């Protein structure tokens, strides 16, 4: 049973470009969470999705950021018009059930904005 | 506001020594508390998960304790190894907020030979 997969592992974008980060949850998991980790800081919650639904996006910036988890395919975190401050590691986690259940993390995508 | 505070922020110990990391939380209503280990450049890996009724849970050389009355948890590492060098993150889930957990900022542990 493969773990949570994220790609790409490293992504370099120039200011103003778009970044698309992908997350494939563990088999059988229908709950996906995205977190951002700035250098030397802790993980910060961004958004929680269930298949085709955004359940909680309270941690996601109102502008330029969006997330989706379609019926088929991976979850996508999209950052439009990236700025240098978006440079961070973005982690995805998945769980089989929502409330307080174990979350399994992917290896992360390291975004660098030049 | 739900908060998770971890201490110390960083810790350096010699190989073979024991250490204890602390986690205080104000998350309510409490659902469960998890400790994760995050190696540099990698995603967090679960060490233990404890519910309200559990006081102690072990995973090899890692032992977590939970005092739900004082809202405190500790992670004790026995006979430390160089590979224990990592960030240890305390995460607390609230029962009413489906899926959303509150993360501590982590304790960075460095084990030196």
Image (spheres, grey):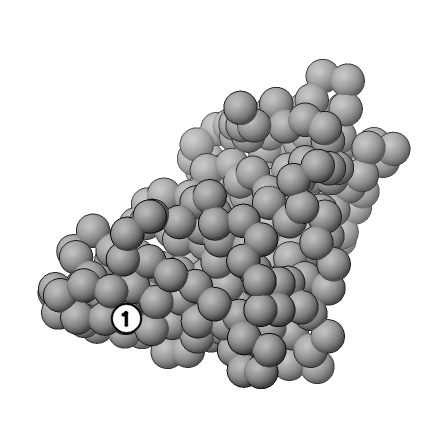
B103 relative to A94 in the view: left or right: left
Q: Could you tell whether B87 is left or right of B69 in the image?
A: left
Q: Residues within 10 Å of mark 1 (few under 14, many from 20)?
A: many
Q: Chain of mark 1?
A: A
Using the image, determine if residue A56 lies above or below residue A89: above
Q: Position of residue A69 (x, y in %)?
A: 53, 70
Could you say where residue B36 lies in the image, as x and y percent from the top left? 60, 49
Q: Is residue A109 visible?
A: no
> In this figure, what is the number of numbered marks?
1
A81 in relation to A28, above or below: above
Q: Residue at x 43, y 63 (%)?
A: A67
Tell me, yes or no, if residue A106 can be seen here.
yes
Return the residue nearer the eye: B106 or A4: A4
Residue corresponding to mark 1: A19
Q: Residue furthest front?
A: A53
| Residue depicted at 54% across the width and 82% down the height | A73
Horizontal and vertical percent position of residue B22: 59, 29
């Amino acid at each position: 049973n493969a773990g949570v997969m994220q790609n790409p592992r490293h992504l370099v974008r120039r200011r103003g470009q778009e970044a698309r980060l992908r997350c494939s949850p563990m088999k059988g998991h229908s709950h996906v969470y995205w977190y951002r980790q700035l250098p030397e800081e802790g993980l910060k919650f961004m958004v929680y999705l269930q298949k085709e639904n955004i359940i909680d996006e309270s941690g996601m910036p109102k502008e330029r950021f969006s997330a989706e988890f379609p019926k088929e395919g991976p979850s996508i975190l999209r950052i439009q018009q990236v700025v240098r401050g978006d440079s961070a590691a973005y982690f995805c986690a998945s769980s089989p059930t929502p409330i307080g259940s174990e979350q399994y993390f992917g290896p992360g995508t390291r975004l660098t904005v030049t | 506001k739900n908060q998770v505070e971890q201490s110390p922020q960083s810790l350096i110990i010699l190989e073979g020594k024991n250490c204890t990391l602390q986690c205080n939380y104000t998350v309510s209503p409490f659902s469960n508390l998890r400790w994760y280990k995050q190696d540099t450049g990698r995603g967090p890996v679960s060490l233990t998960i404890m519910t309200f009724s559990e006081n102690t849970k072990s995973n090899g050389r890692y032992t977590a304790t939970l005092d739900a009355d004082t809202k405190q948890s500790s992670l004790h590492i026995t006979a430390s190894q160089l590979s224990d060098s990592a960030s240890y993150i305390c995460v607390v889930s609230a029962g009413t907020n489906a899926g959303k957990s509150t993360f501590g900022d982590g304790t960075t542990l460095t084990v030196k030979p």
